[in-house]
Amino acid sequence: MGLALAREAYIRGADLKLVVANVTVDIPSVFDVVHVETSKQMNDAVLELIPSYDIFISTAAVSDFEFKQKSDKKIDSANSLFLDLKPTTKIIRQIKKINPDIFLVGFKAEFNISRDEIIECARKQIKDAGTDLVVANDISRDCCHFGSDNNEVLIVDDDDVLTVPLASKNEIAKKILDVISQKL
């Protein structure tokens, strides 16, 4: 979805930069890309860029957890293993603190919940992170899982919910950018 949005924004004349981690899609060389490997690197890169941009679209969350402690050597498989995790920093919740005027778009992927619950989760993100718009969907649906070429989404703000029925990610990107353009 991020690449579909980047393509559409580029076609519309946007000056954009992509911050990407582990992606399985080929990113055209026309895009200015910052490659990162960890959630901390992504956080640092985003926080450095935020003051210079008018719009920030966060299409995917980085890992919600990371290891509290990492081993610098191989762990013996004969021993029991206990994973001690800690929450990662929520990048999206820092954006408006750094650039209060930025138009912030978040994404909210939920699993097997009702339309009303998805809208409630999206509005919670609006409240918690200060997003101006949230694109929400249910990834439990066969046609709308991660990696699918199609999706159906709800575009949610404080007042409205726009339902975008099953369509290609390119078509959804157009709808999302149309809504952003109307809101600016």
Image (spheres, grey):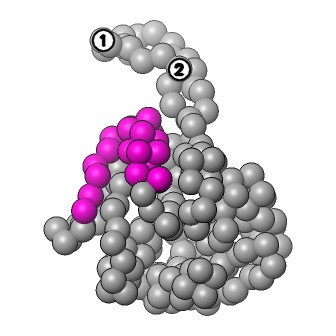
- Left or right: 34 with respect to 123? left
Mark number, residue 114: none
* Residue located beneath label 1 in the image: 73
Q: Residue 118, image x and y in percent? A: 75, 68
Q: Amino acid at mark 1?
A: Lys
Q: Residues within 10 Å of mark 2 (few under 14, many from 20)?
A: few
User: Which quarter of the figure has residue 138?
Assistant: bottom right
Q: Main secondary structure of the magenta part?
A: helix
Coordinates of residue 19 in the picture (x, y in percent): 36, 55
In this view, which residue lies farthest toward the left?
29
Amino acid type at circle 2 is: Lys
Badge 1 crowding class, 10 Å Cα cut-off, few under 14, some 14 to 19, many 20 or more, is few
Q: What stretch of residues is rendered in magenta?
A: 32-51
Which residue has dot 2 on it? 68
Q: Nearer the viewer, residue 128 or 86?
A: 128
For the point 68% across and 53% down, the residue is 129
Vertical placement of 116 versus 56: above or below? below
* Magenta highlight on residue 149: no
Indicate left or right for 125 with 11 as reference: right
Q: Can I make out residue 59 in this image? A: no
